[in-house]
Amino acid sequence: MTNAPEIVLGITGSIGAYKTGDLVRQLKEAGYAVSCVMTQRATRFLAPLTLQALSERRVHTDLFETDAPQIIHTALADHARLVIVAPATANIIGKFANGLADDLLSCILLATRAKILFAPAMNVHMWQHPTVQRNVTTLKRLGVRFAGPDVGKLACGYEAIGHLAEIDEIVRAAKQLVPVVGGPPSGSGTPPAAARSKPSSTSKPSSRKSKKRR
Ligand SMILES: Cc1cc2nc3c(=O)[nH]c(=O)nc-3n(C[C@H](O)[C@H](O)[C@H](O)COP(=O)(O)O)c2cc1C
């Protein structure tokens, strides 16, 4: 058994999605167990298989997974110590700020009582739009922590605010919110039952023991 804190990492439909492979890798090296949840739009930017290989877990993309023995969004929400959304689109920020739940990630965000960290990434004018800023303020008032966005070269060509925070910064924020006690584990952590629902060749037999909830 490991003490690896469980993170649900939500990935949404931004160019910055390609960086999340590195985020998964660094979070695991820091001692976390990571379950990835991708929106349908995120899968247009990055193949789930990439994150499955790096997280050593099944990647969830569908609220209505028919082969899962549990209700997938509540199982992941209950098991998480921390939910990170990186990159976070204007869309997911707006949905969460307004209590909308129309896909797996937005359902998890409403169902969880874990700490939540958003790392937004978007065009500068989207970020500065009053509706987006209003939604960000709403989420901050609710206790959602933000990393970035930073000033940088954006995909749209602007050198401006809207750039995904550096992966180091996101990992640092995760460590502040949910420290890893005792340092990185030797194994990759125990998947929640929901993540185990479809055994894959990447599962490690030694990591299949039951794990206490937080
Ligand atoms: C090439 C491309 C890049 C995009 N990058 C971003 C982005 O960085 N941030 C953002 O908020 N939306 C971006 N979008 C728009 C989102 O993909 C769109 O709002 C989508 O509905 C988000 O869905 P999701 O939040 O469910 O993933 C981009 C769209 C395209 C086609």
Image: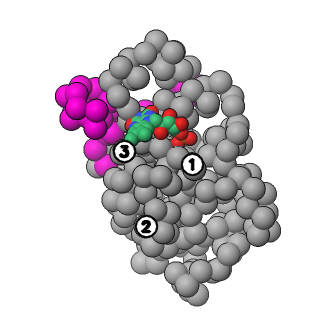
Considering the image in quadrants, where does the C terminus appear? Answer: bottom right
Depicted 114 relative to depicted 25: above or below: above
Quadrant in which residue 68 is drawn: bottom right
Which residue matches tag 2? 50
Sequence-first disc among 1 and 3:
3
Identity of the amino acid at label 1?
A: Thr
Identity of the amino acid at label 2?
A: Thr
For numbered disc 3, what is the local secondary structure?
A: helix
Which residue matches tag 3? 15
Q: Badge 2, how many Cα within 10 Å: few under 14, some, many 20+?
A: some
Asked if one can make out residue 209 in the rendered structure from this viewpoint, the answer is yes
Sequence-first disc among 3 and 2:
3
Q: Nearer the viewer, residue 58 or 1?
A: 58
Give the number of callouts. 3
How far is mark 1 from mark 3, CA to CA? 13 Å
Residue at (22% x, 27% y) in the render: 158
Q: Position of residue 84 (x, y in %)?
A: 50, 46
**Is 146 a magenta residue?**
yes
Whether label 2 lies within 8 Å of ligand 1 gets the answer no
Q: Badge 1, how many Cα within 10 Å: few under 14, some, many 20+?
A: many
Q: Badge 3, how many Cα within 10 Å: few under 14, some, many 20+?
A: some
Contact? badges 1 and 3 (CB < 8 Å): no
Q: Position of residue 85 (x, y in %)?
A: 49, 43
Q: Position of residue 167 (x, y in %)?
A: 31, 49
Whether label 1 lies within 8 Å of ligand 1 gets the answer yes
Q: Nearer the viewer, residue 70 or 27?
A: 70
Which residue matches tag 1? 39
Residue at (42% x, 52% y) in the render: 45
Spot the residue most to the top.
130
Q: What segment carries the magenta color?
A: 139-167
